[in-house]
Image: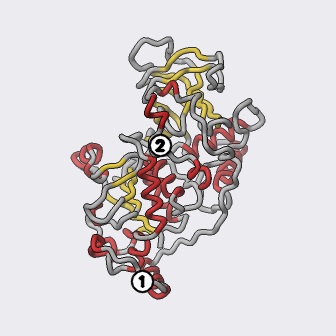
Amino acid sequence: MNLLSRALRITVALILSGSSALADIPQELQDVVFSGDLNARSSVDFRGKAKNLVSVVPKDSEGTVLETRKLKRTGSYGVKVRITKVGGGKTKTKEGDEVWVYFSQKDPWLAFKDKDGSEVQDPEVALTSRAIRDGEGLPVEGTEARPTLPTKESVKANQMPEVDPNLAKNKDPRQTEGGFITTCKDCSTTKPSETAQRNLQNLDDVSKEVSRSSSTSIPKNAAAGKWSNDPMIMGYSEGKEVKNTIRYGMRNKRSRSTSYCYRYVKRALMGGDMIDRYPPGGHARDAVRDLKAQGMINLMDNPKYRDMIKSPADVPKGAVIVYHNGTKESGDVQIKTDWGDNGGFVSDFYSNNSFLSSPKARRYAKQGKPYRMIGVMIKP
């Protein structure tokens, strides 16, 4: 990598992260897999009246990412790809075609992989950084020349209605590209918050501090069981931020997995006022680092709490659980919705069972690469 290219990447990372000294250079998007049939266009114009439709790329096709642009009107992305594999079905698309396809913020019918072949569970930072680089000196009508990451205000403004009318009447990904109208008029113009965040490492000291400074009684909840006498845990789990985070997550979840668990968890945390800035990581395993940078702490760092958490059912209400197995796999992340067995787990979809009960986790366990909880994140 030459010095100019390296300097540009560092500049992009600084633009994306505001004043945060802990942000890294975002993951590079390499490959893309189509999870639905998508219109292929010759230019980055996704309006219904645009006369640039060249074919339909069928489901299960694959490609290489060449360029990205953020669209002013919708806040979603146009992605230029070179087709490397054509899925089944009748189509004019052929290998080697270079076409523009639509990555919808609400219905992302594309799955990305990084240069290591790992699935990217939130491509937002990578898409934005690539769009900044691709847009330098080459303005394209209808796109953001210098896009920014979602702000807390835009995340809240763009939550799902109680019943999404777009999904209720249509499940065709080709029809989502022009019809999605954002409810946030200036989602890409608000500067990210630069509020300093404190990362407390000693959980015993934090617990004592909360106990000493509490001027009101911590809410009691019989369902909390062994956590009921811990003022730090109870103050977090019964607080309004946890309530709002769970509500946002449940309101915006999908009916099934989208492979974007971390993307949905990030937005739930921002929508619930748990964090202020959009975390930079593209993989679920990055959540421990990302959330510590915004003042959250990992209960698994402390032997006292680690001994109390033997399974996801033991995790306090509202905690963010991060799973990984020490491989190049992206991992998984979920928010615990209630105490003990009373609730379930939400990320991009809701389940009564934790990720450790999923077919993927069971498959890796049989291969001798079991997933475990590497993070149980709360904010004191």
Question: In this rendering, is residue 13 above or below 317?
Answer: above
Dot 1 alpha-carbon crowd within 10 angstroms: few under 14, some 14 to 19, many 20 or more:
few
**Badge 2 or badge 1: first in the primary sequence:** 2
Is 366 left or right of 263, judged from the image as shown? left
Amino acid under label 1? Answer: Ser
Nearer to us in this view, 230 or 159 = 159
Q: Residue at x 47, y 32 (%)?
A: 109
Q: Quadrant of residue 211?
A: bottom left
Amino acid under label 2? Answer: Val
SS class, disc 1: loop
Residue under label 2: 120
Question: In this rendering, is residue 232 above or below 113?
Answer: below
Residue 247 seen in this snapshot: yes
Q: Quadrant of residue 197?
A: bottom right
Labels 2 & 1 near each other (Cβ < 8 A) = no
Q: Nearer the viewer, mark 2 or mark 1?
A: 1
Q: Residue at x 49, y 61 (%)?
A: 289
Question: In this rendering, is residue 38 above or below 8?
Answer: above
Dot 2 alpha-carbon crowd within 10 angstroms: few under 14, some 14 to 19, many 20 or more:
many
Nearer to us in this view, 72 or 136 = 72
Q: Tell me the distance, in whole angstroms, between the alpha carbons under discs 2 and 1.
A: 43 Å
Residue under label 1: 217
Is 272 left or right of 48, judged from the image as shown? left
Residue 9 seen in this snapshot: no
| Residue lying farthest to the bottom in this orientation | 212
SS class, disc 2: strand
Question: Residue 27: x, y in percent?
Answer: 54, 45
Question: Residue 274: x, y in percent?
Answer: 51, 63
Question: Residue 286: x, y in percent?
Answer: 47, 55
Q: Residue at x 39, y 70 (%)?
A: 299
| Residue lying farthest to the right in this orientation | 137
